[in-house]
Image: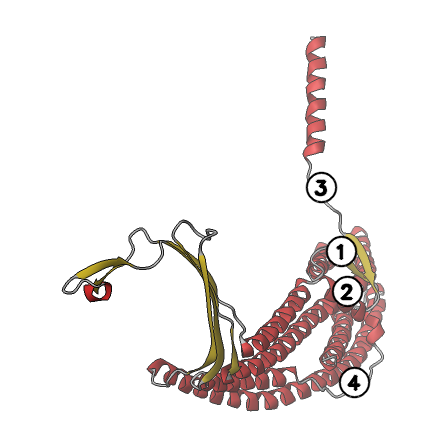
């Protein structure tokens, strides 16, 4: 029996050791504290995959432009090498008179059995309107890529802005409910004492306890929502860190002046799309214009009766240079229809660009109005919260003196609590809208 126990312990030890070695190497997230939104945005730009991809897209656009520059001349040197073993050579029948044999034909084998040829054909374009049009298209594409990346950056910042102030709001709500939970405990304690003294009803005790449970439930739900928002924010850092925010929503009690919005990325994007389509039309038309090219050919031929490149072989070289004019006649239905389609698309993009200017002006004004609305709302909510707090304290004193019902006390208590939470929401809205304006003005 003792041997069995020892073997069992040994087996357990082996299992534990194997488990330790098999546990995957999990790197714990580093916790990083942020003092304000700008610090969050700055670090996100170095961590988020969107900005990494944006750098690659910019490099691709730059490569496209360089390729277009090279295609204007399109230098190329087709090269080939050929080795032929003429197993059966061509036979000619020549008149016998040539050889002094009138009226007859003599069979003559022509050519060499072994033939090799090296051919190089350097050529490049001298006049290429389509290539020039491609350069302009590539430049517009580069500007469009850069502008689109800025729009993506702005979108990421706005998403972070939303989560940032959700976190500040949840933290402040947790703080307020935690502070007011003591008041709910006091109400429950008074109600329980009255019931024990037979001067209160059990229903009142139940209602006071329900009020306390609701507060604790709200506190738990807010804590979970806070955790969800913090993890959502961590995703913008590709989960490489776990962010904690040290700023408080109360920092936005003092309203700040905002600058007029000067963001025009959407307008510029619409304008560049229109320019791109117009350039595509020019490129499609330029493809029908003639192209002037420099052409040449360098040839080295080796002929031998014995074998390739034999010492007794003969080498012949022959070359040429010249100009070549080529063009595609615009008779293809597909090409003509393609130009017409692009012209229709350009008309649509022109209308979109004109509308985009008006839409941007409206959105910019709306951002300012949203901020002003939040400021006014804060002032009103603060007054309401002060009045609700005063009402509750007076009702609480009356309840202690047993001249006010529990229902009226709980109503005033919850009204006071909701008023305080509304102040928090208004502060978060001020910070969110102010930061949204600041983000728009970055671009």
**Mark number displayed over residue 76:** none
Mark 2 vs 4, N-terminal side: 2
Q: Nearer the viewer, mark 2 or mark 1?
A: 2
Observer able to see residue 406: no
Q: Nearer the viewer, mark 1 or mark 3?
A: 3
Viewport quadrant of the N terminus: top right
Q: Residue at x 51, y 71 (%)?
A: 122
Crowdedness near tag 4: few (<14), some (14–19) or many (≥20) residues, C-alpha within 10 Å: some
Q: Which residue is mark 2?
A: 43
Q: Nearer the viewer, mark 2 or mark 4?
A: 2
Q: Nearer the viewer, residue 158 or 404?
A: 158
Crowdedness near tag 3: few (<14), some (14–19) or many (≥20) residues, C-alpha within 10 Å: few
Q: Which residue is mark 3?
A: 25
Question: Would you say the residues marked 2 and 1 are in contact, meaning their CB atoms lie under 8 Å apart?
Answer: yes
Mark 2 vs 1, N-terminal side: 2
Q: CA separation, marks 3 and 4?
A: 49 Å
Q: Secondary structure at mark 4?
A: loop
Q: Which residue is mark 1?
A: 241
């Amino acid at each position: 029996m003792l041997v069995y126990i020892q073997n069992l312990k040994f087996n357990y030890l082996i299992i534990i050791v194997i488990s330790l070695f098999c546990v995957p190497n999990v790197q714990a997230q580093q916790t990083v504290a942020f003092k304000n939104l700008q610090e969050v945005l700055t670090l996100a730009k170095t961590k988020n995959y969107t900005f990494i991809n944006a750098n690659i897209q910019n490099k691709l656009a730059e490569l496209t432009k360089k390729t277009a520059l090279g295609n204007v001349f399109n230098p190329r040197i087709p090269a080939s090498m050929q080795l032929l073993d003429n197993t059966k050579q061509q036979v000619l029948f020549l008149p016998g008179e040539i050889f002094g044999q009138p009226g007859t034909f003599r069979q003559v084998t022509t050519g060499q059995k072994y033939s090799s040829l090296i051919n190089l054909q350097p050529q490049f374009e001298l006049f290429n309107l389509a290539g020039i049009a491609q350069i302009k298209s590539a430049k517009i594409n580069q500007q469009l890529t850069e502008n689109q990346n800025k729009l993506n950056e702005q979108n990421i910042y706005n998403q972070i802005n939303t989560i940032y102030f959700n976190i500040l709001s949840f933290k402040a709500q947790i703080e307020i409910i935690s502070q007011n939970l003591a008041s709910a405990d006091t109400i429950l304690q008074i109600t329980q004492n009255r019931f024990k003294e037979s001067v209160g009803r059990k229903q009142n005790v139940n209602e006071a306890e329900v009020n306390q449970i609701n507060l604790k439930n709200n506190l738990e739900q807010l804590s979970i929502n806070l955790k969800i928002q913090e993890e959502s924010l961590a995703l913008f850092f590709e989960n490489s860190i776990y962010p904690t925010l040290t700023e408080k929503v109360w920092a936005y009690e003092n309203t700040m002046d905002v600058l007029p919005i000067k963001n025009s990325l959407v307008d510029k994007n619409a304008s560049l799309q229109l320019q791109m389509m117009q350039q595509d039309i020019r490129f499609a038309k330029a493809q029908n214009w003639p192209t002037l090219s420099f052409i040449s050919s360098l040839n080295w031929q080796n002929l031998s009766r014995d074998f390739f490149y034999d010492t007794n072989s003969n080498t012949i070289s022959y070359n040429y240079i010249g100009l070549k004019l080529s063009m595609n006649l615009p008779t293809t239905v597909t090409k003509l229809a393609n130009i017409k389609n692009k012209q229709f698309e350009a008309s649509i993009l022109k209308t979109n660009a004109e509308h985009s200017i008006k839409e941007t002006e409206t959105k910019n004004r709306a951002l300012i109005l949203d901020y002003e609305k939040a400021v006014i709302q804060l002032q009103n909510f603060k007054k309401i919260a002060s009045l609700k707090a005063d009402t509750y304290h007076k009702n609480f004193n009356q309840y202690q003196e047993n001249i006010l019902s529990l229902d009226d006390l709980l109503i005033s208590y919850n009204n006071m609590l909701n008023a305080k939470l509304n102040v928090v929401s208004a502060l978060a809205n001020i910070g969110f809208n102010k930061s949204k304006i600041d983000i728009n003005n970055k671009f």
